[in-house]
Image (cartoon, grey):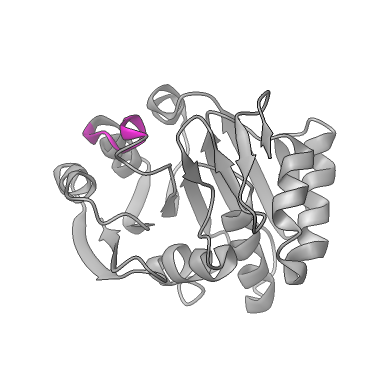
Amino acid sequence: MTDQTAGLGWTAGGVPVSTRFDDPYFSLEDGLAEARHVFLRGNGLPGRFRPGFRIGELGFGTGLNVLAAWRAWLDADLGGPLEVTSFEAWPLTADAMETALAAFPELAPLASELTTAWRAGRRMIETPTLRLTVIVGDARRTVGAWDGQVDAWFLDGFAPARNPELWETALMREVARHTAPGGTAATYSAAGAVRRALTEAGFSVERRAGFGRKRHMTVAHL
């Protein structure tokens, strides 16, 4: 089944696949478990959470990573909002996001808040516990133009072999420039080009065990 207008297809198991990049939006095995392994634990979360914690993300996709972080933030019960800024070139429709996120019933209340706001055209979503901004456009331009700074990055673009623009050294330098001292980044990718780009941007890079069938992933510290 393929939605040609959205550049979106679906596997038999209900996982959304980008027809533009021929790559799934999240793990075919368990997208939520992947988000927690790669992006939360890869960034030392929730252990590093503190009031006012800020997350940046390359590749908003279905919003799954943000919802996983939001759920962990709520469980940590620190008060105030988690601040998230996500950069996305090809935003999904609310219907597509809703269909994809239905696979994760434990996130249903949060997913409903997200998709309701998204359907209304809101790309800045503020609740007592989440302050989310999704910046639409090519990250190679939008990250550099942004004036924010974060404590942790979720680097979740499509595979480097299919979407090399989102892993360029120049963009990783912008990621580093917008990272607070002692900040971190994590990605499912262990590609040599990705690790080199992060190293050249000034990060200390470490390869760790990946999720599911992926042997390795990458974490980085500034």
Image quadrant in which you'd find residue 74:
bottom right
Residue located 79% across and 30% down the image: 121
Picture coordinates of residue 151 (x, y %)? Answer: 42, 56
- Image height of 110 relative to 168, above or below: below
Picture coordinates of residue 128 (x, y %)? Answer: 77, 58
Q: Inspect this view and state whether residue 114 appears.
A: yes
Picture coordinates of residue 39 (x, y %)? Answer: 45, 62
Magenta span: helix, strand or loop, mainly?
helix
Q: Inspect this view and state whether residue 58 appears.
A: no
- Indicate the quadrant containing the C terminus: top left, top right, bottom left or bottom right: bottom left
**Start-end of magenta stretch:** 163-169
Q: Is residue 2 magenta?
A: no
Q: Report the number of numbered marks.
A: 0
- Image height of 46 relative to 135, above or below: below
User: Which residue is more in the foreground, 113 or 100?
Assistant: 100
Residue located 62% across and 32% down the image: 91
- Image height of 77 relative to 152, above or below: below
Left or right: where does residue 179 sit relative to residue 104? left
